[in-house]
Amino acid sequence: EAQVTQNPRYLITVTGKKLTVTCSQNMNHEYMSWYRQDPGLGLRQIYYSMNVEVTDKGDVPEGYKVSRKEKRNFPLILESPSPNQTSLYFCASRSKGAPNQPQHFGDGTRLSIL
Amino acid sequence: DAKTTQPNSMESNEEEPVHLPCNHSTISGTDYIHWYRQLPSQGPEYVIHGLTSNVNNRMASLAIAEDRKSSTLILHRATLRDAAVYYCILFTTSGTYTYIFGTGTRLKVLA
């Protein structure tokens, strides 16, 4: 089954404790991206990657890092989390091909930073 | 960056057509219009996309204004399972390849 898998699904942690949210896709997609979703603000793109070793900033990259060492994985790293990064996070992937290729989203990771 | 504006919420009766509007007055020539929807407790799922011409698929239709500054997602017969937040998105292929989501329209379907 084609899917995007995020882990963990839920995490409560404290300010300053480094954390990583993993994202893996099994569709051999080149393009992957991370979003955060906050009430009243919709989804905002954090980072995206066009292919292995190619990453770029989205709308709200501050406080986040990403890496793309393998095609299937695109982890989101919070080096020093702060309460304003409490949010619902989604990973997505799509085939690079034409711009009409749909994105496939994971089920989300809810982070609470105390 | 181009942005989209949508009504916060809409209601529809079951089995009736629904027209969900989206304004994107600053759209550029290389921006594609995508629609996604998000069911409760799930990630967004693709609905339809277009560039200039109207589009139909098994889920919905997309009507794009001639000047491309607005578009309308049409659900031909709303069902209770269509209750979701619908996002109108511009996918820019000019340089940044980013997706710009609006805040979405929450569709309520009444039985």
Image (spheres, rainbow, N blue to C red):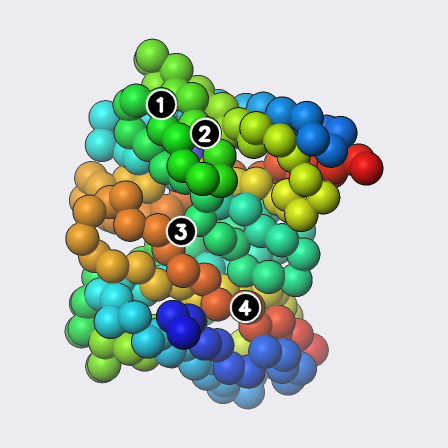
Alpha-carbon span between mark 4 and mark 3: 21 Å
Q: Which quadrant of the figure has residue B111?
A: top right
Circle on res. B4: none
Amino acid under label 1? Asn
Is residue B14 visible to the viewer in this orientation of the structure?
Answer: yes
Circle on res. B54: 1
Mark 4 and mark 3 lie on one chain; the one further toward the N terminus is 3
Q: Which residue is mark 3?
A: A59
Amino acid under label 2? Ser
Residue B67 in the figure: left or right of residue B43: left
Residue B24 in the figure: left or right of residue A97: right
Circle on res. A107: 4
Query: Could you say whether the residue bearing mark 4 is in a helix, strand or loop?
Result: loop
Q: Are marks 1 and 2 in contact (CB under 8 Å)?
A: yes
Q: Which residue is mark 2?
A: B61
Q: Nearer the viewer, residue A13 or A82?
A: A13
Amino acid under label 3? Asp
Alpha-carbon span between mark 4 and mark 1: 30 Å
Q: Residue shown at 23%/81% (left/top)?
A: A70
Q: In the rendered image of this protein, does residue B26 appear above or below residue A67?
A: above
Host chain of mark 2: B
Query: Could you say whether the residue bearing mark 1 is in a helix, strand or loop?
Result: loop
Alpha-carbon span between mark 1 and mark 2: 7 Å
